Each structure stands twice: as C-alpha cells, then as structure tokens.
Amino acid sequence: MNMTLTDIIMIVVSVFLLLIAFFAVHEKKLIKSVIFLSALSMLSVVSYVLMKAPDVALTEAVIGSGLVTSLFIFTLLSIQKKEDVQ
Amino acid sequence: MKKILAFILTMGLGALVIISLSNNEFFPEFGMADLTERVSIEYITKGSALDVIFNQTNNPESGPANIVTSIVIDYRSFDTLGEVTVLFISSLGIALLLGGAAIPKRLDLNFKPNFMLRVGSRALFSIIIMTGVYVISHGHLTPGGGFPGGTMIASAFLLLYLADDQFRAKIKGFKIMESIAGSLYVIIGLIGLILADQFLENFLPNGTVGVLISSGILPVVYILIGLKVGSEISGIIDHFLTEEEVL
C-alpha cells in the first residue's frame, strides 16, 4: 500500500475532525464548546481544499470559523450580562 | 450509561452510512466518477462538444472560467435570487427581534482598547476590504464570489467593532445599499426577460473565457450580490452589538 502525502494529511485531518467534534459536544463550558466548533470549521477547510472544493473552503473559512463564532460569542456575552443584572 | 448508549448509536449510524455507500454502484470512489455519463459534463464543456480552453475559447454558452460560478449565477441564477431572499428574511427577523431599541447603546467591551490596537485594526481593515473586493470582482475567474466576498467585507466591520469601543457604523446607509442592490438584481433579471426571452438571461456578449471583463452580466450580478450580502451581514453584526440602554 503506497500512500501519498495527501492521503496521510487527509487521514490525520479526519481523525482530528472526529476528536474535535467529540470535544465540542462533550464540553461542559459553552464558550469552550464554541471555540472547539470554530476549530472544527478551520480543520474542515483543510479537508475541503484537499477534496478540491476551493469555493466551499473559502465560504466555510469566512462564515464557519469567522462570523458564526463571533455571533455565538456575542450571544453568550449578552446572556451572561443579563444573568449578572438579575 | 446514557453517554455510552449515545456513543454506540452514533458509531453504529456512521458504520451504516459507510457500509451502505462503499458497496453502492451509484457512489463511485473519490476521483473515479465518469463525468461523460452525467449531466455535469454539459456544464463543464458549456454546451459544446469541444473542451473549454483558458484565454482562447471565445463566446461559449456560459462565460465564467469558474464552473461553480457558471452554475450558481448563470444556469441556476433564479435559485441564487431565492438564496439572497432567504438571507434577507433572516436579517429582517434579526432586525425585528433586536433592532427595536428606543435608545440604542453599544455593547461594552471588557477591556479598554489602546491607541496601537485602534490604529492597527484600521490598517488591517483596509486590507480585509481589499481582499473582499478582489474576491467579489474575480468571482467569475477564481474561487469565491459574492457570498464569501460580502462576508469578508462584513468581517472587516466586525474587526472595527471589536477593536474600538466607540465605533458604530452608519447602519442607515447599509440598509439603503442593501435595498438598492437587491432591486437592481431583479431589474437586471427583468431586462433579460425583455431582451432575451427568459428571466435573468445573460443578454451581453460572453467574450473570451478567463479575461476580467467577460461573461456578460455575471460580474455585475456578483458585485450586486456581494454588496447586498456585505451590507446585510454588517447590519446583523450591528444589531448583535447594540442593545437597549438599561436606565
């Protein structure tokens, strides 16, 4: 069995994707879960590029790991603020 | 116990998907699909029997060098209009939920931004805007286009919101730009309906594949989509970061 460098990178990325997805679900603190979700998006960008889908990779990099993470964090911040007031 | 059960269930479902796909004749191995048997070959060769050659093919059925763009904006442009509408409705919902503050007030940051952070973020802001404009205007040549480019422009505004605790974008201008861009998209579609029989039909000449000014109305439509998406998502960010002042 001869594996190219791309295959090895693909396997490593897939294993990390599974691990990070598990951490994102299993994490007790919400903010850490959001960060794991962002890391999951970032790694899936690598896998999209390896699977020759640069359009999807670009969109995922901007939306998945940039905007969605920030919106989640803002929501968490405002929820915490409301709890502090009460 | 619950966790173990969930773990076993997830693994079982994953194994089921892998097993059912690995012995399926409709699901060939990665890179082994024979495109000549499928519809997508029509999109790749753009309706002709010849191969499309970069910088040489003149006036094909659909202009862009990027196949994804030629499907999203040319062959299936009506679907993209629906997609833009979905984004508009979601931003409308956020505006109804969060934008009704009588006295709008910016969300406070937990730290005081210093001078260096503010100046550095201004410098980075221009670079991100330039990347977004590049991605939008080269949408028919390289990967990317209106949706990712518009989101890049919005994330530049997000950077300014995060790095400066006094900054507030002029949200009214965004709303005007968004409605103008959306209306122009529909108007271009109607011009296509009048000049060339079909809604959103490409009525300009396509030109040579791979040149910046080519493929008729598609760059114009992508610039409009980029402006619309950018202003919409900037508005969403502004709504998330403003709240009603608690007196």
Image (cartoon, rainbow, N blue to C red):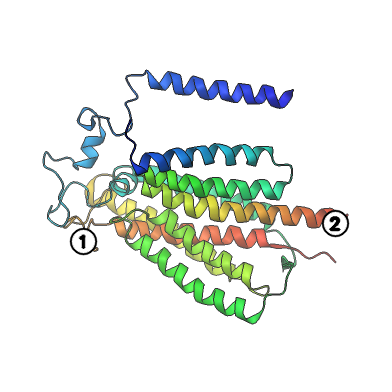
For the C terminus of chain B, the quadrant is: bottom right
Q: Judge whether A17 appears above or below B240 on screen.
A: above
Is B234 located above or below residue B90 in the figure? below
Instruction: Give the structural element (helix, strand or loop) at label 1.
Output: loop
Q: Is residue B173 left or right of residue B243?
A: left
Q: Judge from the rendering whether residue B35 lies leftward or rightward of residue A33; answer left or right.
A: left
Residue type highlighted by circle 2? Asp
Instruction: Give the Cα distance between marks 1 and 2.
Output: 57 Å
**Farthest-out residue, bottom:** B115
Q: Please name the residue that numbered disc 1 is placed on.
A: B211
**B49 up-or-down from B131: above or below:** above
Q: Is residue B42 visible?
A: yes
Chain ID at mark 1 = B
> Which residue carries the number 2 mark?
A84
- Can you tell which quarter of the image residue B103 is in? bottom right
Neighbourhood count class around disc 1 (C-alpha, 10 Å): few under 14, some 14–19, many 20 upward = some
Q: Residue sitting at 45 percent across and 71 percent down?
A: B127
Counting from the top left corner in percent of width and height, residue B13 is at: 55, 22
